[in-house]
Every structure is written in C-alpha cells, then in structure tokens.
Amino acid sequence: MPNLDALLAREFPVETHCIYLNHAAVAPWPKRSAEAVQDFARQCLEGGARHYRDWEQTEQGLRERLAVFIHAGSADDIALLKNTSEALSVVSQGFPWQAGDNVVICAEEFPSNRIVWEALAERGVQVRPIAVQGAVDPEQRLLDACDARTRLLSVSSVQYAAGLRLDLARLGAGCRQRTMAFCVDAIQGLGAVPHDVEAMRIDFLMADAHKWLLGPEGVAVFYCRPEWRDRIRLHQFGWRMVEDPLDFERRDWQPAASARRFECGSPNMLGIQACAASLGLLLEIGAERLEHRILERSEYLFDLIERTPRLELITDSRRGRYAGIVTFRHRELPSPALFQKLQAHDVICAQRGGGVRFAPHCYNRLEGLERALRFCTD
C-alpha cells in the first residue's frame, strides 16, 4: 500500500491531541468510522428507516468481511452480538454439559472468560484455572490439565493484563486430538495479530469491536463452527433468530440455519455502520502488515524499557509470546502514582497486571512511544 503513514495520519487525528496507548481498553475510531456514523445519523434525521435496506446490506457486508478476516468458511458462520460476554455466555449456557464435566481456563483470565464458566457449578461442571504467566511452556501446562472429563478449553488469545500471547494452533490441535471443544476470547488479539479459525481449529471465537478492531462498543463478532451450531442449546429467543424473520405471521418457526440463530432481536445498526468502516480500514492495510507494525511498536517499547534502569518489563518479550500489550512497572514509583503522572501528560494508558499497560496500534508514531516512556522517569 503506497503512503501508509499518510493514510494513518489522516484516519487518526487523535495523534494530535494525546499519546493514545489504550487500545487494549477502548480504541479511538478512524475518521472514516466517525463519518459513517455521522452519515447514518443524517439518514435517520432526514428519512427515518427509509434506507433500512441499505443498512441491511452493510450488515451483511460486515459478516462477509469478518468471515474473511478470521478465515471462516462462510458469512453464515458469523453472528453479530452485543459483546464478548454475551457470546461466551451463549457457549457456556448452551454447551451440552453433563454433571462431572470440567472446563480448563487460564488463571489470569479477564472476568468475562471466567465468570461464565464458574456459573456452571450448579450444573455440576468444574472450572480448572491454570496459571500460565511465567510458564516456560504455557500450552503444555494447559493441555496437561485436561483429562477424560474435560469438554472444553477456553483461553484468551492474548491475556489482558500482562499481554501473554498463546499458540492457538498448538492448542487447537491438542483439543482436536482429545476431542475437546476449543473456545477463544480474541478481544485482545483480533485486529492486532492474525486469527485463522480453520488453521487453528477454533470451534468458537468471540471479540468486541471496540479494542484492536478500532470499532464501537455494542458490537461483537461471534464465530461458531458449523458442526456446533445445532449442538449449542439456545437460551435467547426473539423475532430475528428464526429462519424467515420477515414472515411475522408464521407460527411454525425454526431457528435460522446460520449463526444468526444466536441473534435474538434487532441489530445495533448504528454500531454496525462504524464497525464495517473500521474493519474496511484493517482489511485495506492487511493482517500481516497490521501485525508487523504492532509488533514493531511492542518491540520498540521492550528495547526502551530494558535500557531504562528504573523500569522493569512485566510482559513476556520472547518472540511469539507478545502482541500489542506491553506492561511494565517503575522500580521506585508505585504504579498508581506512575499512572497518574502519565495521565497528567496526556498519555492515555491503563493500570493492569501490577504495573502500567501500554497498548499501541499500527498508527502510533515511534517518537510518541519514546516520549511517553520519558515521562516515566523525568
């Protein structure tokens, strides 16, 4: 792509207002996404639902783009839900459990990928949290925790606090060998590093749009492998999840054959407009180039931190063990005080994992990263 830096400068004016390093929390929108929402609002103002058919085409286009982005077989494999937690709940509450089954997760998981499994205790399902931070071989540790009653392994592709990245292809192969289902909370990875549901043998994948996908809150992708669609028991019902949602008089309804069966009610059309625009930019840049630029920024931060005696890196800097999250601490200044200092200098970041978390995206300038770290020790 010619002149990528110029494109990113146009799309992300946030760079002129602050040093934004909080994409692992809530990302700023690209300019095109804000314009898509403004256009949608104008259409609603001037014509109500006059353009609804056009909006539905954008919705279907988003499903198709998401299928391409994660290498799914078809747009029929994609549901558009409200958030990651809803998608995880669809799996946890609909999975064909039997009393005595267990699910293996990482001990360091964000609550979304922990609470949904712990809620199964009343059905006799045990949760096995396995510590992976600092492990020499976290994948083997997770697979070793599985036994004959393990029905599902659920992990984040990238851990939210320290930023540990897991080898999803290896875990997917291990699950397939053990005839277990493989569930991936991809919210901290999708948009930063490639996810291929076929190559990685992922059965369920979910991710909100508002982090590395550079979209709005209130829209999430949910991928369900086709052979699992009929096996996940539905717990949400409504007009939209049926095979023919526009036949309002029909009484003998059936759930849609596609993943739309998991969408019970009206879609978030406003969010869909923004998400479609954001994803269009990511596809225009390309998954490999996105990964290269984001890893380049992580590695630049690693190098700066390691050359600064008063700072200590928390994120695992081994190749393949990190994505866009870089968490570190100050050896003398408590992390809450360091966080407040950075905020005062318009460095937008977060406190996580016992330190301060930086999460730059593809557009962040290297000189901005250097300036942000300089504030830590000035």
Image (spheres, rainbow, N blue to C red):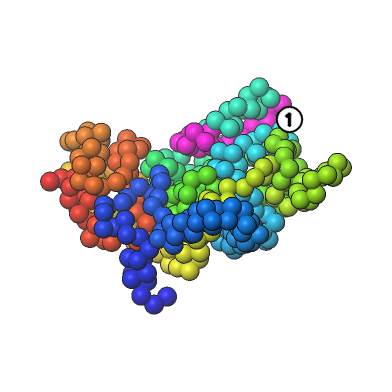
Q: Is residue 162 left or right of residue 366?
A: right
Q: Is 371 drawn above or below residue 112 in the view shown? A: below
* Residue sticking out furthest to the left: 378
Q: Is 2 drawn above or below residue 362 in the view shown? A: below
User: Which residue appears at 40% of the width and 50% of the height?
Assistant: 27
> Can you give x and y, in whole percent of width and height, for residue 19 in the image?
27, 52
> Can you give x and y, in whole percent of width and height, for residue 257 in the image?
77, 51
Residue at the spot of label 1 = 98
Start-end of magenta stretch: 98-114
User: Which is more toward the observer, 182 or 46?
Assistant: 46
> Can you give x and y, in whole percent of width and height, for residue 29 in the image?
41, 55
- SS at badge 1: loop
Q: Amino acid at mark 1?
A: Gln
User: Which residue appears at 55% of the width and 53% of the height?
Assistant: 44
User: Which residue appears at 58% of the width and 36% of the height?
Assistant: 104
Magenta-span inclusion, residue 228: no
User: Which is more toward the observer, 222 or 266?
Assistant: 266
* Residue sticking out furthest to the top: 122
* Residue sticking out furthest to the front: 46
Q: Residues within 10 Å of mark 1 (few under 14, many from 20)?
A: few
Magenta-span inclusion, residue 106: yes
Q: Is residue 282 left or right of residue 350?
A: right
Is residue 121 visible in this depiction of the protein?
A: yes
Quarter residue 57 falls in:
bottom right
> Can you give x and y, in whole percent of width and height, for residue 153 in the image?
60, 41
Is residue 67 visible in this depiction of the protein?
A: no
User: Which is more toward the observer, 41 or 265?
Assistant: 41
**Quarter that holds the N terminus:** bottom left
